[in-house]
Image: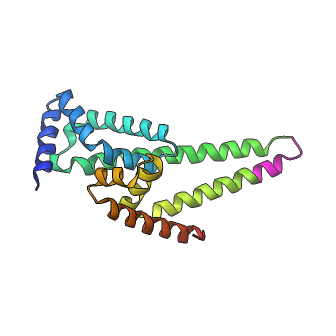
Amino acid sequence: MDAATDDLAKLVREAQRRNPDAFVALIEILRPRLWARALALAAEPADAEDLLQETCLRAYEKLADLQEPRAVLSWLLTILDRLGSARHARRSEKSWERMEARHELTEPDAGQAFLELAEGAEAAEELHRALGELAQADRELLALRFGADLNATQMAQTLGLSPEAVRARLSRVLGRLRKRMGVQP
């Protein structure tokens, strides 16, 4: 393993001994990757921040359960993914409840309002499905660009790539997403 992974493993072991400074340092090091994933999972940046905070809390509570300190990033991303999936399921259910409530309105155009809302929800679901079909690294790339509003240079620093590689990957990912959504470039 590399020195960075060894350093993370040391921080994990120290944090497992309930050293809060070590845990904070660990999260700060991994925050760009965690933030990118949270943005990929959440509808809004504020939701991503909530998701990231909830992940950190859960991780701190369960840190003693982590058997392999070198796998801390995968472990944190798994927690984040599970919390994000649970939030998405709750949000989808609430969205349909709101649509049903609007459908029951007595206004003459309530039916039209329901159809428009349903079409918007269907488009959002289609986009969510298309994003879900992308590789996790591709979703993270999109989250950094459009969620965190980073430019190619900033993304390159976060991902450890060159700006040219980031631009090329972003172009390919957007092309696949456009094709999947049936959108002409």
**Residue 85 versus residue 139: which sits nearer the camera?**
139
The answer to whether residue 58 is above or below residue 179 is above
Q: Looking at the figure, which quarter contains the N terminus?
A: bottom left
Q: Is residue 113 magenta?
A: yes
The answer to whether one can see residue 68 in this image is no
Asked if residue 98 lies in the magenta stretch, the reply is: no
On the picture, is 115 further left or further right than 84? Answer: right
Q: Give the x, y percent position of residue 132.
A: 47, 60
Residue at the image point whose x is 13% and y is 34% from the top? 14
Please give the name of the residue rendered at 16% of the width and 28% of the height, measured from the top-left corner. 19
Residue 46, image x, y percentages: 48, 37
Compared across the picture, whether 23 is left or right of 104 comes to left
Report if residue 53 is visible in the image: yes
Q: Residue at x 15, y 38 (%)?
A: 11
Task: State the residue in front, 28 or 41.
Answer: 28
Q: Position of residue 54 (x, y in %)?
A: 38, 35
At a point 82% along the width and 50% down the height, the residue shown is: 111
- Please give the range of residues in magenta: 107-115
Give how far across and how far down residue 73 sits, in percent: 25, 48
